[in-house]
Image: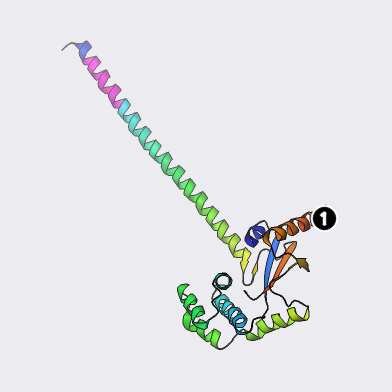
């Protein structure tokens, strides 16, 4: 759904980590970042969104299924290479008052987390922006 | 064999030769056209693919999707759970 909105050129989507569930949250974020190092950020994002397998071995196996350099991936994961960046995102979000997951914002304001309502909000905002420009 | 029959025979051979030549040429030309149009279709498809790949590359970035200048920015704060 997000991708369809993005394809219109109207929308940019950004994902920000929140670590509300301890180790699973942390492993998901770190593995996704390590996958991103090898150009597969979105594959890991989609994997965790659907599998909810937040084990180290599961992440390495998924990296292998994508034919990534698993040694590099495992090192990245074990060394927690991206921990500081991920924690910084979490801290900034917490300081801004975003503690519930998922939280969606549209142009800085509260957004719906249900797909249809979110699309409606985006369309309304787009129409409003067009009016302002026109 | 009369001269008239010879002329008719020559005429028939020439006619058949012309027909064969035109068919052959036509077929050859047709084949050439098919080849050309297939090549044009392939080129168009290839151009479309390159354009699509370029667009996807622009759109799909680490932890973000879409044009950095898009008027609407959706931020999702999440931990996949």
| Segment colored magenta | B6-17
Q: Is residue B11 rendered to the left or right of residue A34?
A: left
Looking at the rendered image, the quarter that the C terminus of chain B falls into is bottom right
SS assignment for the magenta stretch, majority: helix
Q: How many marks?
A: 1
Residue at the limit of the structure toward the bottom, as seen here: A79
Q: Is residue A35 rendered to the left or right of residue A12?
A: left
Looking at the rendered image, the quarter that the N terminus of chain B falls into is top left
Residue at the limit of the structure toward the left, as seen here: B1
| Near-viewer residue (A49 or B50) | A49
The answer to whether A129 is drawn above or below residue A61 in the figure is: above
Question: Where, by quadrant of the figure, is residue A122 drawn?
Answer: bottom right
The chain to which mark 1 is attached is A
Q: Is residue A132 rendered to the left or right of residue B25?
A: right
Residue B6 is at least partly visible in this image: yes
**Residue drawn at the location 52% of the way across and 86% of the way down:** A75
* Image x and y of residue A86, in percent: 66, 82
Q: Is residue A45 rendered to the left or right of residue A69?
A: right
Q: Per the image, is B11 magenta?
A: yes
The answer to whether A43 is drawn above or below residue B72 in the figure is: below
* Image x and y of residue B71, in percent: 75, 61
């Amino acid at each position: 759904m997000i991708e369809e909105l993005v394809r219109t050129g109207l929308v940019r989507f950004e994902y920000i980590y929140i670590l509300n569930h301890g180790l699973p949250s942390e492993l998901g974020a770190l593995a996704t970042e390590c996958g991103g190092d090898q150009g597969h950020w979105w594959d890991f994002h989609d994997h965790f969104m659907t599998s909810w397998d937040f084990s180290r071995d599961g992440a390495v196996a998924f990296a292998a299924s994508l034919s990534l350099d698993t040694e590099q991936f495992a090192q990245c994961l074990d060394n927690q290479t991206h921990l500081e960046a991920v924690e910084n995102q979490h801290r900034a979000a917490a300081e801004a008052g975003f503690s519930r997951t998922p939280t969606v914002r549209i142009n800085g304001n509260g957004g719906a987390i249900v797909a249809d309502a979110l699309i409606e909000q985006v369309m309304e905002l787009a129409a409003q922006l067009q009016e302002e420009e026109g | 064999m009369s001269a008239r029959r010879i002329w008719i025979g020559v005429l028939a051979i020439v006619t058949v030769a012309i027909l064969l030549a035109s068919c052959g040429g036509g077929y050859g030309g047709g084949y050439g056209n098919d080849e050309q149009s297939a090549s044009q279709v392939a080129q168009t498809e290839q151009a479309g693919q390159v354009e699509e790949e370029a667009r996807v590359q622009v759109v799909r970035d680490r932890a973000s999707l879409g044009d950095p200048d898009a008027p609407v920015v959706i931020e999702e704060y999440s931990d996949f759970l």
